[in-house]
Amino acid sequence: MSTDAALVIPEIPCSEECLLREGNTNCGGCGMSLGLNMLARALADADQTCQLAIPACCGIVAAGAFPTTAYSVPTIATTFAAAAAVASGMVAIRDLNGERHQVVCWAGDGGTYDIGLATLSAAAERNEDILYVCYDNEIYGNTGGQRSSATPPGARTTTTPRGKREAKKDIIAIMAAHRIPYAATVSIAHPDDAHRKFLTAFDTVGTRFLLIHSPCPTGWKSEPADSVNLVRLAVRSGLFPLYEVFDGLRYRINARPDGADPAEYFARQRRFPSDAVDLDTTRRVCREGFERLETLAQAFPG
Amino acid sequence: MPLDVVTGNHAAGHALSLAGEANRVGRGTACGIYPITPQTEIVERVAAFPFSRGRVVAVESEHSAMGVTMGASASGARAFTASSSNGLAYMVENIMVAGFYRLPIVMVAVNRTLGPPWNIWADQGDTLMLRDFPWVQLYAADNQQVHDLTLLAFRLAEDPRILLPVLVCMDAFIVSHTQAETELASQAQVDDYLPALNLPHRLDPSHPRALGSMVWPAATVSHRKEIDEAMARVPTVIRECRSAFLEIFGRDPGGAMEIFETDDADAILVASATVATTARGVVERRRARGERVGLVTMRLFRPFPADALRAACSPAGRIGVLDRDYAAGVGGIWAQDVRAAFQGRGDRMIQDYLLGVGGGDVTPDLIERIVDDLMARADGDAPVWADLAETWTTAPAAEVDA
Ligand SMILES: Cc1ncc(C[n+]2csc(CCOP(=O)(O)OP(=O)(O)O)c2C)c(N)n1
Ligand code: SF4
C-alpha cells in the first residue's frame, strides 16, 4: 500500500445517469474509469450528449454482459482497427439528420497506436468531426498485458519479458502532423485541466484527439490506490508532459515538470525490473523532450 | 421502357445510388468506398452521384470502407458499398460484423481471382469464401440481373423479417466491363420500391443500447438461432420482393434459382452466373438432339436453397456441378453444398467440375465435354479439372457433330 500523504482522488460527481454506471467490469484503480467520468462531467457541464464507438479493448468489456450495459449512451463495439471508420459513418448520418451529439471514439493504445493507426490517420486526414479519446495504459490490458507501441522502454510485459527495448511512439506528434484542429494530453491527476480540455474539444469542430495517461494497476503491477499519484508523478517528472497542439502548429504547455525524479515513478511499479530502465537516459529524454516542447510553444504559441 | 447500353458496373452503381437516394425520406444514406479492379467503376459512379441527403466517404482501406458503411447503417441510414477479391479478403472482419449486427447493408461484389499471384479475371472464390457469415448471397448472370438484384437486395435486406446484409455478385469483366442493353430504373420507381428504412436497433439516444459488447454462450446461441431463422425466411421474402419488383418495374428480376429442362432430365448441370448462361446454350443443343439434359441456374447461394434444388433435380440420376472456384483440399465450393443437399436422400451421382478457374474461358465446347463425361461416368469421383487439356482424352461430341 502506498503511504503517499498527497494522495487525492478527485471528487467527480456521478449521477444516476452517469456515463459509466455501476456494474462495469473495470479493475479497481483503473484510470479509464476516471477518464470516462471526466468525459461525463464535461458533457453534463457543456449540456451535450454523446454516442460511443469503442474498439476491442477494456473499454468495451467495461460495458458488462448482454442484456445489461454499463454505458448510459448509445454504444457500438467496433472491430479492433475500425473505431474511427465506424465513427465516421455515425458522424455522416448525425450531420445529415441535424443531430448534435458528440461522436466519441473511446480506444486503448493498442487500438490507437497500433492496429487502428491507419484508420485513425485516414479519419484525421478527412478531418472527421470525431472526438477520439485514447486512454493510454501503455499495454494491451484486455488480453492480459502485452506490449504496444505505447509501452515505455524498460517495461516488462508478457511479450517483452526482459523489458521493452524500443521507445514509446509519439502519438501526439503523429496526430499533430495531420494538422487536426486540436490534440492534447490529459492526466487524470489534473482534473481541472482535463475538464477544460474536454470542453475545448467539444467547442472545436473536426478531428479532436485526447491522450489520457491511464494507469492500469493490473498491467503496471502497481497499487490501485496509487494510480492517480503515479500519473501525477509522470507529469511532475516530465515523463508525460501536459500540453495542447492547435491545428497541428501552435503549442501550449499546461504544466511544468517540477524536477521530480522519474526514478520514483519506476520504483512504484513492478512492471519495471530494476535493471531494465536506463535512468540517466530517461532523465535526459524527459529534459530534452520538454525543452523541445518549450521551444515550440515559444516560437508558435497556442 | 428505354434501354441503355451500359456495363455491369454501371448498372450496379446506378442501382446503388438510386437506392441510397430513395432513403432521403428516411435517415439518408452513406457509404465508405475503396477502389479495386474490376469493381472500381461502381464506387466511382456512387462518388459522382448528386445525393440530396447522402455522404460518400473515400477511405483508406476496404476494412474502413465497411467500417464507415456499418457506422452509417447502425445510425439508421441506407448503406452500401462494393468490393472484389483481395479487397473482400481485407474487409473480412468487418463483413462478418455487419452480419452479426444484422445491418441491412448491400454490397456488390465483382468476382475476381484471389491473389497473389495477381490475376484480375473472373473466379468466385472471393465471395464464396464468405459463405459462413450471416450474409445473403445472390449471383447475377448479366447486366440486367446485376441491376435488378441490387435493388431487390435492399428490399430483402431491410425487410424486418430478415435484417441481414446482402451480397450481389457478378463475374469480373464478362459482366462488370461488358456493355449490354439494360433497363435502368428511374428514381421514381426506386422510391416506390424502397420505402424509407426504419432500422429497429439503430443507435438511438432515446433507447441507449450497447451494440456488440460481451455476451455469454446462452445469448450467443439465441443470436445465432435468430440468424438461422431469418435465413430460413429468405426464400419466402425473396418471392415477395420479386412480385413487388414485377409490379413496379414491369419485369421479373428472377428468384432463388432458374430451372431449365429439368422435368424429365437424366443429367442436370448446376451452375451460376455467366457459366450458367453458356451452359444453357449447351443444354439447348443437347435437347435438340433428344438428350435428356437439364440445367439449374443458382442465384441464391446463402441461404443455400437445398429443398428447391432437390425438387428441381428430382428425376435426375446424374448431377454435374460447375464450379468456377477452388477450395484447397476439397474442390468446388458449390459442389460441397449440392452434395450436402442430397446427402442421405436417395442415390445420385454427383460430380464436381472445376472450370474457368482463375478466369479461363468457359466455352460451349468445354461444357459439351463435361456433359459427355457426366453421362458416361460410372461414379462420382474427385473433382475434374476441366480447364486442363490432359483431363480430356477424346474429342468433344460437339466437334464431332460439326
Ligand atoms: C483483430 C483483432 N486482433 C486481436 C484482438 C485481440 N485483442 C482484443 S483487445 C486487445 C488489446 C487491446 O489493447 P488496448 O487497445 O491497449 O486496450 P486495453 O485492452 O489496454 O484497454 C487485443 C489484442 C482483437 N479483438 N481483434
Ligand atoms: S486491465 Fe488495466 S485498463 Fe483494463 S480494466 Fe483493468 S486496470 Fe483498467
Image (cartoon, coloured by chain):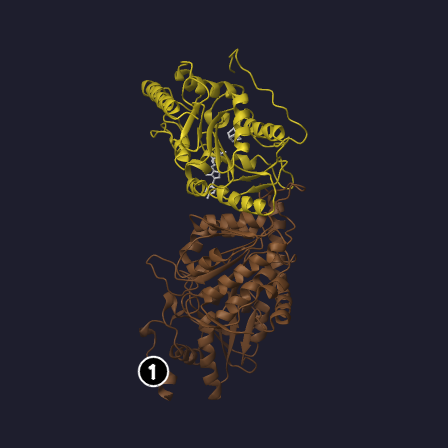
Quarter holding the C terminus of chain A is: top left
- In this picture, is B82 found above or below A6? below
Q: Secondary structure at mark 1?
A: loop
- In this picture, is B265 found above or below B7? below
Q: Label 1 CB, ligand 1: below 8 Å?
A: no
Could you tell me which chain the residue with mark 1 belongs to? Answer: B
Q: Position of residue B62 (x, y in %)?
A: 44, 51
Q: Position of residue B189 (x, y in %)?
A: 60, 66
Q: From the viewer's perspective, tell me whether residue B80 is left or right of residue A46.
A: left
**Chain A takes which shade in the image?**
yellow
Q: Position of residue B53 (x, y in %)?
A: 57, 52
Q: Residue at x 50, y 18 (%)?
A: A229
**In the rendered image, which quarter is residue B86 located in?**
bottom left
**Chain B takes which shade in the image?**
brown
Q: Nearer the viewer, residue A39 or B179?
A: B179
Pointer 1 residue: B395
Q: From the viewer's perspective, tell me whether residue A187 is left or right of residue B231.
A: left
Q: Position of residue B257 (x, y in %)?
A: 55, 71
Q: Residues within 10 Å of mark 1 (few under 14, many from 20)?
A: few
Q: How many marks?
A: 1
- In this picture, is A281 found above or below B254? above
Asked if residue A158 shows in the view, the reply is: no
Q: Amino acid at mark 1?
A: Ala
- In this picture, is A247 found above or below B71? above
